[in-house]
Amino acid sequence: MTALHCAYCGKRVTKRDKEHVFPKCLYPPSKAKSKVQRLTIPSCRDCNDGWADDEAHFRNEIAIAGEPNPARRELWEANVLRSFDKIDGLRRARDIVDRMKPVSTDADIRYKIYPGEDERVIRVVRKAIKGLCYYHKVLTPVSDSRIWVDVLKYVIVPEFLDQMSHHHREQDIVEYRYRVLNEHGINSAWLITFFERVPFIGLVSASENVFPK
Ligand SMILES: [Zn+2]
């Protein structure tokens, strides 16, 4: 039997030590019994700990960014609003309100949210990329400093998009594409889109010290 290793740190783990690649909390109630297999990977307890808070914050922020699709609207109504009623709900709501920035338009002031500027959001996406790197046997384990993540701000040329292999587990919740490059110091490129609206781009470097700290 081959030994299992934690996808995040490389430590040996048992079969029972598992973690979801994408946060479970992104799935609204109607998707809870989905037949689509959720991705899980081996993960030690140390690496499993300490994610719940950032993942809930991630869910709340993504649920508010951009136009909602039906899955996200359900998540907002059934999960996010309810989370504000819980004991730490006021803090959670404030965490989101703090992220909103005023933008002047001709008529009035609107508030926008920028997930790419939120380190807690980026941290969750980085974790997903680590999990996918393991799952697709691209590279493992990958340290934080080797993953650069941002919200996708530019249109990717179709030729490059065509060269990325396309995967989706539940398109209205999350879908992703990736491509192994191994050139210019870059190991692989990842494109992860949440709720068909919020796309993140991630690059994994082939070695340490490629991305500025
Ligand atoms: Zn670990």
Image (cartoon, rainbow, N blue to C red):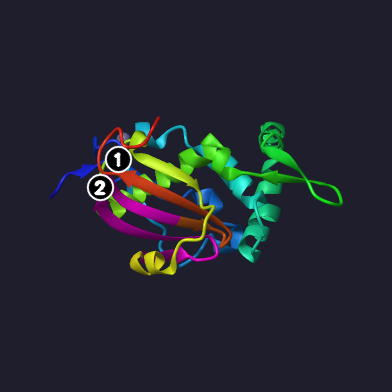
The residue to which callout 2 is attached is 139
Q: Residue furthest left?
A: 1
Query: Where is residue 79 drawn, in percent x and y?
Result: 65, 50
Residue 107 at least partly seen: yes
- Magenta span has 169? yes
Check the picture and name the quadrant holding the C terminus: top left
Q: What x and y, as percent, mark residue 167? A: 39, 65
Q: Give how far across and how far down residue 85 sits, in percent.
A: 72, 40
Q: Secondary structure at mark 1?
A: loop
Q: Is residue 111 above or below residue 159?
A: above
Q: Which residue: 71% across, 47% down?
A: 81
Res 31 quadrant in image? bottom right
x 70%, y 54%: residue: 77
Q: Is residue 135 left or right of residue 175?
A: left
Instruction: Residue under label 1, please give it.
Output: 142
Q: Is residue 153 above or below residue 9?
A: below
Find the magenta span and give its range.
Answer: 165-191
Residue 27 is marked as none
Tell me the CA gap for discs 2 and 1.
7 Å
Q: Nearer the viewer, residue 120 or 4?
A: 120
